[in-house]
Image (cartoon, rainbow, N blue to C red):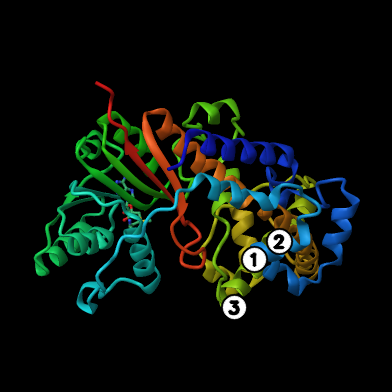
Amino acid sequence: MTDTSALQQAFGKCSALLQQYRAYWQLVPFAWQQLPWHNPALEQKLLSLPEHALAAIDQSPALQQQHFAEHFAGLGQLEQYLSAAAAELPATELKPVPFWLANGIGGRKLAQIAAFAKQLPPSQLPLLEWCAGKGHLGRLLAWQFNRSVTSIEWQQQLCVDGSALATQFHLPQRFVHADVLTAAGSAVLAPQQQVLALHACGQLHIQLLQQAVAAGCQQLNVVPCCYHLIADEHYQPLSLLGRQHDLVLSQHDLKLAVQGQVTAGARVAKLRHTEVQWRLAYQALRADVTGDSSYRPLSSVAKHWFSGEFADFARWAAGQHQLSLPKAPDWQGYLARGTEHAALVRRIELVRHLFRRPLELWLVLDRALYLEQQGYQVQLNAFCDYQVTPRNLLIQATRQAVPA
Ligand SMILES: C[S@@+](CC[C@H](N)C(=O)[O-])C[C@H]1O[C@@H](n2cnc3c(N)ncnc32)[C@H](O)[C@@H]1O
């Protein structure tokens, strides 16, 4: 069992690390024309790294350690604090899932569901699946444990499809078509319930935690994702400790926590490369046209832009900034400047990304501490391998009996 102090200790370490190295992660890499820190040893390390090594280091916690542990004391120890806070849960035995039941569920999602199901504490409570999509998780659990499941989802078609599958396989799963951010959404929560949320985005799982506490739900099993999708401009910590050690996180800062992608395919990686080069090339063009070299963000665009022509993208970007471009800019010259600036930005990002896991741990621990504060017994685990999903932190909370 996790005791309060283990979660608090892990949170304290995370907070201290993020505070100490704030200048290395709480920044906008595109806005810098040189390395943002005066740190000659780190600068030398970054400039000595060949281009082809950057992506591999970025994707591998072991390589990150190997290259950067000496520059950032304490970075490598965070996962140990998490294990200290995690309980050894006996894995639940599962029946093998027949092919007809798994039909239509992607391989990775199926692996996530199996790993999630294995970690569920034994219970006879009815299950509630929050932000269910087609209710794949709920459907498999209804079959696996023969327990009734209510799945709440706001996209009507997903409810229709999910209901049809449950009916087809005679499973005790029903759908509620509602917005979980409204009173109709919270109305499905009840004390005698085991509530599940697999990859419910920021505000959606925050709403769940707050409303489940208010409703007194017995058990919660929550895997958060998309921490940056929140209602406020800045993150409002949920726990008392979180408020005391508020990092004042903007939505841009929060996005860092989800930037650890499982290696993208070569085509996606190439498009991303081109996107960064073109955005920075346009930035140089804009600076020359306006005389203002400060960074001005552009909205995100569909990836197909980056298999077209830079000139078309630059004209679109100028339109976004209500800017007239000269008739014939030196497109090749700007592309070369974009390439050079991109090499710098990749190195700033490499350092910034060292802090994505600590930031994610800080955010998840804030949620765990909030539940603990509300009288729940809380455990935090990595429920599956990072390759199965990088959003692999599972919060399990059980409401403790109120003393007579
Ligand atoms: C990332 S998906 C996760 C789906 C599923 N739990 C899974 O792991 O595959 C999030 C789901 O939340 C639903 N959703 C988004 N906003 C919602 C809201 N306000 N109320 C209810 N469901 C919502 C989306 O339609 C989507 O199906």
Task: Judge the density around disc 3: few (<14), some (14-19), many (≥20) Cα neighbours within 10 Å.
Answer: few
Is any part of residue 252 visible from this angle? no
* Quadrant of the rendering where the N terminus is positioned: top left
Q: In this orientation, which residue lies closer to the viewer: 326 or 310?
A: 310
Query: Which residue is at 86% across, 63% downward?
Result: 47
Q: In this orientation, which residue lies closer to the viewer: 17 or 154?
A: 17
Measure how far apart labels 3 and 2 are at the Cα level. Answer: 21 Å
Q: Determine whether, in the image, residue 168 is placed left or right of residue 102.
A: left
Q: Which of label 3 and label 1 is nearer to you?
A: 1
> Disc 2 residue type?
Gln
* Residue under numbered circle 1: 60
Query: Which residue is at 50% across, 26% downward?
Result: 240
345 relative to 235, above or below: below
312 relative to 356, above or below: below
Tags 1 and 2 in contact by the CB under 8 Å rule?
yes
> Disc 3 residue type?
Ala
Q: Percent position (x, y) of residue 353? A: 66, 55
Q: Percent position (x, y) of residue 252? A: 59, 45
Is any part of residue 11 visible from this angle? yes
* Circle nearer the N terminus (3, 1): 1
Q: In this orientation, which residue lies closer to the viewer: 351 or 97?
A: 97
Q: Determine whether, in the image, residue 36 is placed left or right of residue 262.
A: right
Mark 1: which secondary structure? loop
* Residue under numbered circle 2: 64
Measure how far apart labels 1 and 2 are at the Cα level. Answer: 6 Å
* Residue under numbered circle 3: 266
